[in-house]
Structure formats: structure tokens, C-alpha cells
């Protein structure tokens, strides 16, 4: 049930991003401050775990740093995660930017730290607005690896 809902959510986000990417839009947003709301999912053995993420981000020239909160719920158990995520823009066109990211997080319920990295693509959909599609791999120890996927909308100021 969670997996099918999660897959549907990712498909809708991908279709919307593709639709917006095909429109003629202005250059990639250079808003120094942005707020992002995302649908997120953890891919673990036994299926997917749906979640949400909210973050605030400060962007300089090629680098940015964000911090935020994630909530994942599976079978009544919740995981609250606070995180810091630095990013570096690796390449860009007039409508898109590819980035690499690192993430340091703190799982509130277990007092565990998680570390990892990944990347994504930003698609400009208008003045100060970007669709953010990303994936990360992170772990609390050498034995557990978690993959996270995310689709969100960022609003710049």
C-alpha cells in the first residue's frame, strides 16, 4: 500500500516537472533565500516509507546550505529527522541545474546521527520557483544504508 502510493506520488511529480520543463522559462532562479516543501520517501527492505520534508536554504553563487525537518511514518511509528544539507551546483542550463549534496541528520526518536550524500536536479518553473528532484544515500553505521528520494517545490525570495 505504501509503495504504490509512493510510486504514484513520484510519477505525478515527475510528470509535473517534465511539463514545466518543456515550457519556455527564464534563467535558473538565483534567489538568495528559499523555502522548500517536498514529498519524500525512504526505500528500505520491505517497501517504501512515505514522508514529508520542509527546509530553508541560503544560496550563494554555486554553493548553498539548507537546514530542515523530515517526518516519515510507517505502521504507526514515526521518525522525526533534523538535518543540515550543503549543496554544490555542478552544471546548469537556462532551465535546469544539477547539484551534488551532503547531508548530516539527527533522528530525534533514536538520538542517532545519519550521514550521507547524493544529488538532484532543479527545474526552473517561473520567477523564484523550482521543482527539486533528488536522491540520497545515507547511513547511521556501516551496516545500514538507506536510500531517500524527494520531489519538491522551492519558493525563492
Image (cartoon, rainbow, N blue to C red):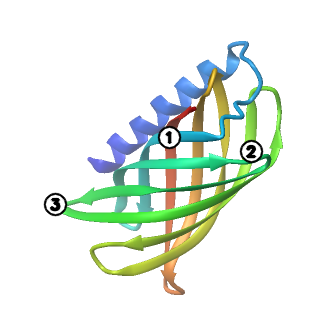
Point out the tag, 3 or 1, that comes first from the N-terminus: 1
**What residue would you read off at disc 2?**
98
**What residue would you read off at disc 1?**
35
- Residue 41 in the image: x percent, y percent? 42, 52
Q: Residues within 10 Å of mark 1 (few under 14, many from 20)?
A: some
Residue drawn at point x = 77 percent, y = 24 percent: 27
Which secondary structure, mark 3? loop
- Residue 108 in the image: x percent, y percent? 31, 72
Q: Nearer the viewer, residue 81 or 4?
A: 81
Which secondary structure, mark 2? strand
Q: Nearer the viewer, residue 95 or 127?
A: 127
Residue drawn at point x = 79 percent, y = 46 percent: 61
Nearer to us of marks 3 and 2 is: 2
Snapshot quadrant of residue 70: bottom left
- Residue 80 in the image: x percent, y percent? 31, 64
Snapshot quadrant of residue 82: bottom left
Quadrant placement of the C terminus: top right
Snapshot quadrant of residue 104: bottom right
| Left or right of 90, for residue 75 | left
**What residue would you read off at disc 3?**
76
Amino acid at each position: 500500500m505504501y509503495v504504490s502510493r509512493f510510486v504514484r506520488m513520484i510519477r505525478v511529480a515527475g510528470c509535473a516537472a517534465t511539463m514545466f520543463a518543456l515550457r519556455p522559462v527564464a534563467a535558473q532562479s538565483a534567489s538568495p533565500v528559499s523555502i522548500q516543501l517536498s514529498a519524500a520517501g525512504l526505500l528500505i527492505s520491505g517497501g517504501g516509507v512515505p514522508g514529508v520534508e520542509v527546509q530553508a536554504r541560503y544560496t550563494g553563487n554555486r554553493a548553498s546550505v539548507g537546514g530542515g525537518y523530515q517526518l516519515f511514518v510507517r505502521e504507526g511509528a514515526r521518525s522525526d529527522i533534523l538535518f543540515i544539507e550543503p549543496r554544490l551546483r555542478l552544471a546548469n542550463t537556462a532551465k535546469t541545474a544539477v547539484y551534488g549534496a551532503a547531508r548530516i541528520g539527527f533522528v530525534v526518536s533514536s538520538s542517532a546521527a545519519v550521514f550521507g550524500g547524493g544529488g538532484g536536479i532543479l527545474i526552473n518553473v517561473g520567477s523564484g520557483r523550482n521543482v527539486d528532484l533528488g536522491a540520497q544515500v545515507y547511513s547511521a553505521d556501516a551496516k545500514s544504508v538507506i536510500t531517500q528520494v524527494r520531489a519538491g517545490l522551492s519558493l525563492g525570495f
